[in-house]
Amino acid sequence: MKQNIIAIDGPAGVGKSTVARRLARRLGLIYIDTGAMYRTVALAADRAKIGEFTDETMAPLMSKIRISFTDDSRVLLHGEDVAQYIRSARITDLSSKVSAVPVVREGLVALQRKLGAKGGIVMEGRDIGTVVFPDAGCKIFLTASPEERAKRRRDQLISMGKEADYDEILRDMKIRDERDRTRKTGPLIQAEDAHLIVTDGYTIDDTIAEIVKIYKASK
Ligand code: DC
């Protein structure tokens, strides 16, 4: 058991990133957003004009790609800060597609294990408690209804001054959920020993408080 690894998994739009970032700050741990890594691979593939995502088309890119993080958890592609490019609707859709390709998952899982080897991390994604760190001392599965998640994503986009259509967000979220849950490699599933937290009606602070309680009890 790795006592100082907190693995947080769950579907899109549940607030994992916000929760994981603040939780890490509060506990003095390093925050690693693995979704940002898949998004960065999608950006690199898009820039390389790769139209179809298979092991054959993605293997050359995966053998060369260099993804790293700044101290404040911003993702770098070959040293370039790409945080501003990876949240667009296009890259969001492509990231869900590239994340189903085995060679992409193998490469990123290996990198994630390396980043977390020393422990002291909060790592957030879809397969952290099941595949990346099955021996994490504290596993959380965060979820909420699709409607609640779509509402949160819409509010988040509006607060960033962006346009947001609830029905479109809900539809895209359901498509992405289905893809994440049914892919053959590293699908989104709750680890048997993960603590389930259903966050409908919870604030971010409520969720963090609950995780802190679980984490302290696990030590
Ligand atoms: O968490 P996110 O929305 O930023 O993730 C972007 C995409 O990457 C999402 O479609 C699922 C995928 N992903 C994954 O397959 N495995 C992870 N550990 C993290 C994200």
Image (cartoon, rainbow, N blue to C red):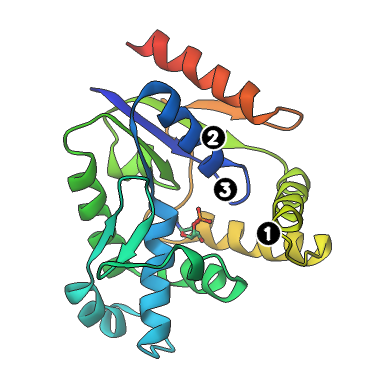
Estimate the x, y position of residue 123 in percent, counting from the top left. Answer: 37, 40
Give me the C-alpha separation between circle 1 and circle 2.
22 Å
Amino acid type at image mark 2: Val
Q: Between disc 2 and disc 3, whose residue precedes? A: 3
* Along the viewing direction, whichever of 136 and 37 lies nearer the viewer: 37
Estimate the x, y position of residue 185 in percent, counting from the top left. Answer: 36, 58
Give me the C-alpha separation between circle 3 and circle 1.
10 Å
Q: Point out the image quarter for the N terminus.
A: top left
Q: Point out the image quarter for the C terminus.
A: top left
Front disc: 2 or 3: 2
| Residue indicated by mark 3 | 11
The circle drawn on residue 19 is 2
Q: Between disc 1 and disc 2, whose residue precedes? A: 2
Estimate the x, y position of residue 156 in percent, counting from the top left. Answer: 70, 51
SS assignment at label 1: helix
The circle drawn on residue 174 is 1
Residue 174, image quadrant: bottom right
Name the residue: 44% across, 89% down. Answer: 51
Classify residue 105 as left or right of residue 170: left
Q: Residues within 10 Å of mark 1 (few under 14, many from 20)?
A: some
Residue 99 visible? The answer is no
Amino acid type at image mark 3: Pro
Give me the C-alpha separation between circle 2 and circle 3.
14 Å
Classify residue 216 as left or right of residue 167: left
SS assignment at label 2: helix
Front disc: 1 or 2: 2
Q: Give above or below for 123 relative to 64.
A: above
Q: Between disc 3 and disc 1, whose residue precedes? A: 3
SS assignment at label 3: loop
Amino acid type at image mark 1: Lys
